[in-house]
Image (spheres, grey):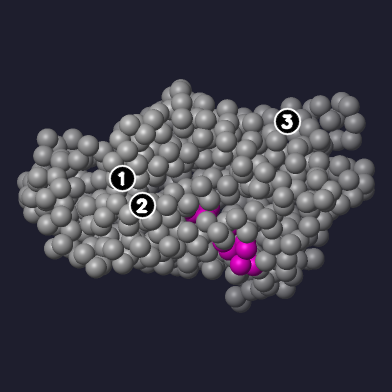
């Protein structure tokens, strides 16, 4: 049956990714040290939140949901991850819809991250070293787009060399990130809060203490607030999203049963430590009340706000150290940005490959390079789409409609969790063949069901919180409609493909009666 229903009798992918390679992939998807940007908004949305504590609290939550995804991947270890699971258990249209949504989302995020490198990394480095004209040039949309095209082509070359080559590059980026984090840690702690306060005041002409006092006058609460910290956990958990992306590489991971657990849980622990350390060091070296107060003054548009740009923590680091040290740290931070983009492109390629192998999209997109075992046709397609998205990001307001992606992400997570709950009944054939760890029980209840139940509860809460007034302000119906619309477009595409195949050949539905071949 496989030879008739699927494009070929084997996927063409090879299992050459180790558990730790997969772990690094997950870590870089989450973009370690991006927390130095997100911390500003967390401080504004949840005044009084103790950010280092939120990072620690997010770890066990992420592990619970991560174990759920790991077990599901062990049951059906194929490229495409939750697309494969949901399409085989619930309905192919739902499987395609959630994966299509994620495809659109991560390429839009990649489009947002390109300026993080040109405008958030290169330009500040050049400014710090006195090259103001060059900094202005690299900040332009034109330069950013040219850089995007070049970097997407570099990503395509790396990915075309296979999954193992991709993870090797990610290891290099990760080492650079650790160098940057180490410099940030040593620099911040060696100068200390008092030293930073003195240098900041001298550089800006504004008293460090006056920033805090002015924010307090405007209503900012100082000190540790437990309620704000627990609410701030919502924002920090969002920074952890992506800890499970190795599920999309499941067809290329060695010893999946062991590797997925190591990759997902290990990624959560490493990323959680980095997030905690980055926040803790920022608080120790610059002052938690100061960072919150400065962010607050920026957000309310106070005339007392002393800086030209946003008070991102990595930019504030320049007041603590000399330009050479600052440059080294920012190279590490920029490496994180480039690595994250590489993982988004690589993941998107696996999505398209899985769709094509099931014949939902044109089958030529599942073509594999014989030498490197990489999906070259899907790679070409994704690269073109990424470049188009970059242009849209820079010159149109279209990608601003992705503002509620966390809400959509939680919908995706809920659908996948529901699939896990009905898995043993709806696909008993696959359930019975699954490894023992997948079918493990606590009393009469499968562990997978317990984990998926918790995932549903957390997803409902996080989905609601992500569109609450505190998080997004007044709810925008057009953005909400756009978010839901992405799922609906995926469903429509599936049924168009189904109608086409029913008329021209083998019914598309037959592809989902079994797992695709390895």
In the depicted view, which residue is nearer to us: 202 or 315?
202
| Structural distance between the alpha carbons of marks 1 and 2 | 8 Å
Mark with earlier residue (3, 1): 1
Residue 116 position by quadrant: top left
| Structural distance between the alpha carbons of marks 3 and 1 | 56 Å
Residue tagged 3? 495
In terms of secondary structure, where does tag 3 sit?
helix
Residue at image location 58% in from the left, 47% down from the top: 342
Determine whether label 3 and label 1 are within 8 Å by CB: no
In the depicted view, which residue is nearer to us: 3 or 213?
213
Residue at image location 73% in from the left, 58% down from the top: 252
- Depth check, mark 1 against mark 2: the one in front is 1
Residue tagged 1? 129
Q: Residues within 10 Å of mark 1 (few under 14, many from 20)?
A: some
Residue at image location 8% in from the left, 50% down from the top: 207
Quarter of the picture holding the C terminus: bottom right
- Depth check, mark 3 against mark 1: the one in front is 1
In terms of secondary structure, where does tag 2 sit?
helix
Residue tagged 2? 327
Determine whether label 1 and label 2 are within 8 Å by CB: yes
- Region rendered in magenta: 19-31
Q: Please state if 400 lies on the left or on the right of 204 as rendered.
A: right
| Structural distance between the alpha carbons of marks 2 and 3 | 52 Å
Q: Is residue 485 above or below residue 241?
A: above
Is-magenta flag for residue 27? Answer: yes
Residue 108 visible, this orientation:
no
- Depth check, mark 2 against mark 3: the one in front is 2
Mark with earlier residue (1, 2): 1
Residue 210 visible, this orientation:
yes
Q: Residues within 10 Å of mark 3 (few under 14, many from 20)?
A: some
Mark with earlier residue (2, 3): 2
Q: Residues within 10 Å of mark 2 (few under 14, many from 20)?
A: many
């Amino acid at each position: 049956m496989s030879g008739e229903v699927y494009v070929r009798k084997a996927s063409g992918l090879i299992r050459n990714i180790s558990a730790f390679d997969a772990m690094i992939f997950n870590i870089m998807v989450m973009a370690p040290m991006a927390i130095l940007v997100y911390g500003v908004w967390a401080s504004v949305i949840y005044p009084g939140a103790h950010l280092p504590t939120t990072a620690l609290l997010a770890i066990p939550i992420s592990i619970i949901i991560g174990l759920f995804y790991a077990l599901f991947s062990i049951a059906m270890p194929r490229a495409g991850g939750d697309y494969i699971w949901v399409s085989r258990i619930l309905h192919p249209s739902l499987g395609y819809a959630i994966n299509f949504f994620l495809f659109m989302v991560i390429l839009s995020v990649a489009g947002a991250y390109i300026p993080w490198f040109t405008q958030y990394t290169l330009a500040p480095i050049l400014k710090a070293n006195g090259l103001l004209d060059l900094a202005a040039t690299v900040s332009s949309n034109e330069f950013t787009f040219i850089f995007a095209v070049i970097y997407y082509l570099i990503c395509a070359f790396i990915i075309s060399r296979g999954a193992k080559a991709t993870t090797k590059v990610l290891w290099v980026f990760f080492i650079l990130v650790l160098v940057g984090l180490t410099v940030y840690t040593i620099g911040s702690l060696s100068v200390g809060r008092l030293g930073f306060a003195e240098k900041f005041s001298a550089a800006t002409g504004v008293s460090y203490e006056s920033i805090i006092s002015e924010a307090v006058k405007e209503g900012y609460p100082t000190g540790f607030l437990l309620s704000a910290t627990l609410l701030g956990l919502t924002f920090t958990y969002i920074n952890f999203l992506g800890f499970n992306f190795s599920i999309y590489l499941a067809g290329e991971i060695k010893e999946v049963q062991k590797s997925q657990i190591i990759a997902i849980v290990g990624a959560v622990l490493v990323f959680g430590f980095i997030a905690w350390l980055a926040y803790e060091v920022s608080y120790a070296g610059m002052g938690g009340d100061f960072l919150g107060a400065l962010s607050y003054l920026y957000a309310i548009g106070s005339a007392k706000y002393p800086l030209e740009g946003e008070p991102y923590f990595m930019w504030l680091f320049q007041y603590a150290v000399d330009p050479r040290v600052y440059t080294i740290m920012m190279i590490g931070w920029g490496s994180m940005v480039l690595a994250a983009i590489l993982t988004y492109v690589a993941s998107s390629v696996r999505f398209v490959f899985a769709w094509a192998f099931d014949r939902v999209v044109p089958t030529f997109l599942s073509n594999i390079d014989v030498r490197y075992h990489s999906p070259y046709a899907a790679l070409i397609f994704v690269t073109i789409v990424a470049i188009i998205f970059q242009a849209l990001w820079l010159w149109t307001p279209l990608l601003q409609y992705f503002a509620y992606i966390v809400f959509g992400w939680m919908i995706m997570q809920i659908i996948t969790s529901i699939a896990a709950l009905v898995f043993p009944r709806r696909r008993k054939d696959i359930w019975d063949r699954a490894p023992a760890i997948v079918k493990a029980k606590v009393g009469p209840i499968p562990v997978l069901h317990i984990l998926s139940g918790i995932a549903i509860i957390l997803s409902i809460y996080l989905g609601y919180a992500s569109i609450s007034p505190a998080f997004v302000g007044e709810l925008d119906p057009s953005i909400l409609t756009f978010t839901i619309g992405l799922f609906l477009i995926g469903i429509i595409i599936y049924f168009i493909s189904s109608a086409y195949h029913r008329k021209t050949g083998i019914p598309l539905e037959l592809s989902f009666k079994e797992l695709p071949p390895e």
